[in-house]
Amino acid sequence: MAFFSAVVMLDDLQVMYYDSITRRARSYDDSKHYDEEKSDAGVIFRDMYNDMKGRAFYLKEHLNFTDGVHVHQRLAGCELLNDDKPGPLQTWDAFDQKNKEEFIFNEEKNHFQIELPWILWDNLQFAHMKFLYKNVYHPVCIKVLQSYLQVKKNNVMRKVKPRVRLMRKMLSDSEGLQISCLATGFYPRHINLTLFRDGQPVEDNQITGGEILPNGDGTYQMRKSLVISEEELREEHEYNSTMKHLSLDNKLDFTFDVAESDPGSFSQFVVFSVLVFMCVVVFISSYGGRDELLVNVLFSSVYYI
């Protein structure tokens, strides 16, 4: 087992892997800059490995952890804004999944900050970390992002509209009814699917599902279900759902026919035609009209200390 491994992701696509056994970066694409990327990655990952290893030993003592297996994880990400202007670089650290530390470097403002620090930093240490983020980590991350974006832009910039399926199933054990809304086949993965009762959002603790799951073709799906009791059926509430996705110009509304007399179950595909909203947003979302493209690196180190 490798003590250290790193996975580089462009949106939800894995583009590079590195571990402490082979000590070499492996790219999943025939990039024309592969040799340069491999060299940059080797320098960055070796530095990260040594840094995380040293911090793991320190944190084990500082946090009064017992001897044994400990896991130190780091998530690092940089972004390009809609004008190809480099955005901030952020890293998040977790030790044994219980503690967090965040580093943020903003190139435009030349500003570096540390949130929830584990270690007290003196001025010299702080200046050294800022130098690394400004002159090494941030420019390398942006260069890798731009390089892989040229190769993978048709994948990460595509938009696929969801297909929506409404389902209704009678519950024989309670005389109640289960309604479900399934959105499937969409890309990118971020979607907003909400169930309403009489115009008010149904509380999350009454809903099952809601996880975004991958399909085998590179798209995603989400299902949300709600059980309606026999008493609620007699009260004749109105149930509907709304859906928002980057491939759609406007939100879509669907109404469930809970008064259907068929005692069995039914499902219905909803077919719609809409204008595509011409806004490129990958991985997270659009904030105030700003588009973002992100590359993320997940580092994981396991130590027996």
Image: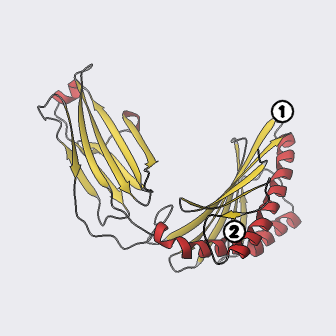
Q: Residues within 10 Å of mark 2 (few under 14, many from 20)?
A: many
Q: Is residue 61 above or below residue 274?
A: above
- Left or right: 20 in relation to 17: right
Q: Nearer the viewer, residue 155 or 277?
A: 155
- Left or right: 54 in relation to 83: right
* Disc 1 target residue: 66
Q: Residue at x 73, y 41 (%)?
A: 96
Q: Residue at x 50, y 72 (%)?
A: 153
* Disc 2 target residue: 105
Q: Residue at x 82, y 34 (%)?
A: 68
Q: Is residue 109 above or below residue 180?
A: below
Say what amino acid the circle numbered 1 marks. Thr
Residue 231, x across and y down, in percent:
21, 24
- Left or right: 174 in relation to 3: left
Q: Residue at x 35, y 50 (%)?
A: 193
Label 2 vs 1, first from the N-terminus = 1
Q: Tag count in the figure?
A: 2
Q: Nearer the viewer, residue 87 or 178?
A: 178
